[in-house]
Image (cartoon, rainbow, N blue to C red):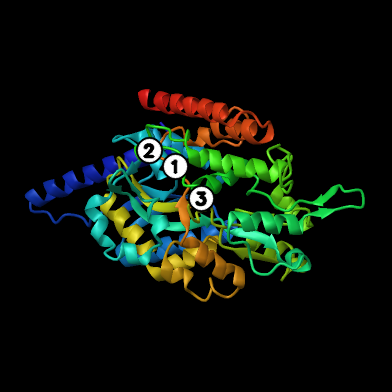
Amino acid sequence: MTQTTNRRFGRRVLMRSSAAIALSLTVLGVPAPQAMAQEIDFWAQDYGDLIAWQRTMKTFADEFKAESGIKVNYEQISWSVAFNRWLTAAQGGAAPDCADMFWLHSFSAIGGDQYGPMPLNEYRDTWPTLEADFYEGSLQDVNWSGDFYGIPWRGDVRPLIYRKDIAEEAGLEGAPQTWDDLVTFAKAMQGYDANGNVTRWGMALGPDTVTQGYVPFFWQAGGDFMTEDGRTATIDTEATRVALSYIRDLVWEHEVLNPDFMERSYSAEGDFPAGTVAMIASAAGPMAPSLSVDYPELDGKWALAIPAAGPEGRDAYAGSGYLGVLRGSDNVEECVQWISFLSRPENMQRLSEASGNVSPMREVMASEFWGDTDWKQVIQETMEYAHTSQHPTPVWNGLLSPEPGAVIYDMMYRAIVQQEDMDVVIADAQARMQSEMDRAFSE
């Protein structure tokens, strides 16, 4: 039993003992001692400046205790171990009362009705204007299988980013709006030396996690990876053929995407500020603020834009975190009070500024803080196209892993880089994906 579990168990026993003593004293006519202050255990990942983030959370805990009398025992979780910590919690390991969580759909599927995230349906009315207050895409991350699990508080939405200076030199105006525009812009911004060798690639798909770069193209082609219950793979479709064919053409027909884009050494995020990649179709959330701080010499030379529209519309890859409660907690109502406190607009604003993450709350994104630069305003616009990146299967992390052997990676590599028969590759991927999902639900 872990230290966290021992602490929770000890506190519960002590509270029950105190209640029994109080009842006995009352029966004997002796005034009962004052009740112990309620406590909750709360975990959160680390964000931004780690010391500043920890200080912010301590301030919140102090303010909440002064207001409610409830003490928050805060534990900061490093992102380097976060996935394994939450996987363990979803399988019955040590867990707090409530937390800053992510991948609700997967961890709920793993924990079932015993462990992991706890539905909060009976507390849903605590937030009567939820749909009006939050972006629709962010609410996908706190609702699953008909249940409500908590409040979204942070986002990682991915707009397009391009070198504005290179585009202007090429005679281009505005930003690409469609898949065809992406090709036009990429060709115009591509650079060559005197011998015809590429010195600057016109575009890249996305961040260094290459499989995540594929996902928005698949959505923009009208695809879904699986059914809503997470039990049936749905990638043997025309949408998969359209998305893979488009990316394959970027490499071999239009020659604007580096053929090595799936290799481990490839880094679009590193090449962009160096000017050797002119455009990234789906830029990771931290990229714009990092460029602002780390590359002041590029100020005014790059710009964000909402993602280009595919045949079936615009979709932006979006990750998010939410504030929720864990199954097995004895302090659900106290946790709901804490989550309600943190989700006040003024506190959501403070969370966003302290962490550097975009907020899923419209009022926060409409604030001066998120409107003082052009790139922040584009992020606001992109929030309207946010599409949750999580899926309701325990094996989603493995399916989307950016490593050889993972289903999506292998499908991309065979279809795009090796140019194998598209129908055969997709059929193989469908069968493999279904097998992985079946095994997950049978265990």
Q: Are marks 1 and 2 in contact (CB under 8 Å)?
A: yes
Q: Residue at x 70, y 49 (%)?
A: 268
Q: Identify residue for label 1.
A: 224
Rendering coords of residue 261 (x, y %): 70, 41
Left or right of 316, for residue 92: left
What whole-number distance in Å separates the C-alpha atoms at marks 1 and 3?
Answer: 10 Å
**Nearer to us in this view, 30 or 310:** 310
Earlier-in-chain disc, 3 versus 2? 3
Where the N terminus falls, by quadrant? top left
Q: Disc 2 on helix, strand or loop? A: loop
Q: Are marks 3 and 2 in contact (CB under 8 Å)?
A: no
Q: Residue at x 75, y 59 (%)?
A: 188
Q: Quadrant of residue 309?
A: bottom right
**Nearer to us in this view, 139 or 185:** 185
Left or right of 82, for residue 197: right
Left or right of 142, for residue 319: right
Residue type at numbered disc 2: Thr
Residue type at numbered disc 3: Gln
Looking at the image, can residue 78 be seen?
A: no
**Nearer to us in this view, 261 or 293:** 261
Q: Identify residue for label 3.
A: 220
263 over 202 or under it: above or below = above
What whole-number distance in Å separates the C-alpha atoms at marks 1 and 2?
Answer: 8 Å
Disc marking residue 87? none
Rendering coords of residue 246 (x, y %): 61, 44
**Nearer to us in this view, 297 or 241:** 241
Q: Identify residue for label 2.
A: 227
Q: Residue at x 56, y 58 (%)?
A: 307
